[in-house]
Amino acid sequence: MTDGSASLGGGMSVQTLKTRALDVAIEMVAKRGPDDVNLRDIAETIGTGVSSLYYYFKSKDALLAEVAAEGFRRLEAGVTAARNSGASPDPIRTCGGAYLRFIREQPMLYKMMYSERILSGFEVTREAEGRAFATFAAGIANGAPSQETEDSALALWAFGRGVASLTMAQEANERGTGRDLARRLVGGLEVLIGRRIRPAPEGNS
């Protein structure tokens, strides 16, 4: 093989195989959770053999690491889009809202992104997290980086991880209650910091 577009058996390129495998794996994570992703099911879905997946991904964990990295890239893109939208002049509300929205909309993918085994074991995931956090921190700083603004960004980043962990545990114990807990946690944070993070109710400025 000389490049990422070289063909495997059956005419499918490596890059196409990688992209399709990641897309299917992300869908499986969203529907089943990260623990139930299966290489054989992925191979069957995209119409290839398991050996073809191993040609590119050295193990199931290597595939999951790429899934987690893609999750961080999507989170970063969401924060960037929120900043560029100009919807709010408040950087904490803009970036914090985008971050919390990603957690709410992609809970299982976010759980995968912060799998201790994956995050500690694969540089590709750690690098993607670093880039996502750097973008988030720059957004919070609003062009004026300082230790204080970076610490604020770090606190919000950690808060998001806590919200995700607590709400998923709550949802597992009593289905349908996780969203309410998340709303209460974010509301409590808003009281503590004296500013709103969530979008204002419709009809309010």
Image (cartoon, helix red, strand yellow):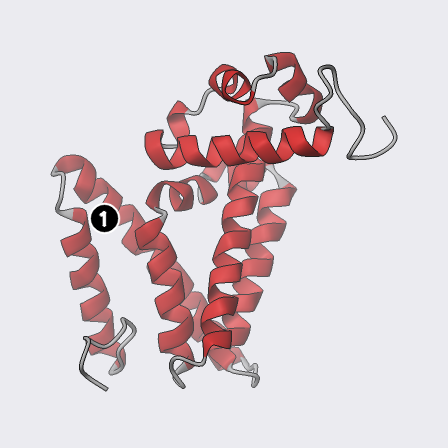
Determine whether 144 is above or below 172 in the image: below
Q: Position of residue 101 (x, y in %)?
A: 34, 60
State which quarter of the image contains the C terminus: bottom left
Determine whether 119 is above or below 5 in the image: below
Q: Is residue 198 left or right of residue 124?
A: left
Between 85 and 117, the residue placed more toward the observer is: 85
Q: Position of residue 50 (x, y in %)?
A: 59, 14
Q: Is residue 114 visible?
A: yes
Label 1 CA crowd tier, 10 Å (few <14, some 14–19, many 20+): many
Type of amino acid under label 1: Thr
Q: Position of residue 69 (x, y in %)?
A: 56, 45
Q: What residue do we see at 64% from left, 43% from top?
A: 123
Q: Give the mark count.
A: 1
Q: What residue do we see at 14% from left, 38% from top?
A: 175
Q: Is residue 47 left or right of residue 98?
A: right
Question: Quick one: SS at disc 1?
Answer: helix
Q: Is residue 161 visible?
A: no
State which quarter of the image contains the N terminus: top right
Q: Position of residue 6 (x, y in %)?
A: 81, 28
Determine whether 157 is above or below 4 in the image: below
Residue lying at the far right of the rendered structure: 2
Q: Is residue 8 left or right of residue 183?
A: right
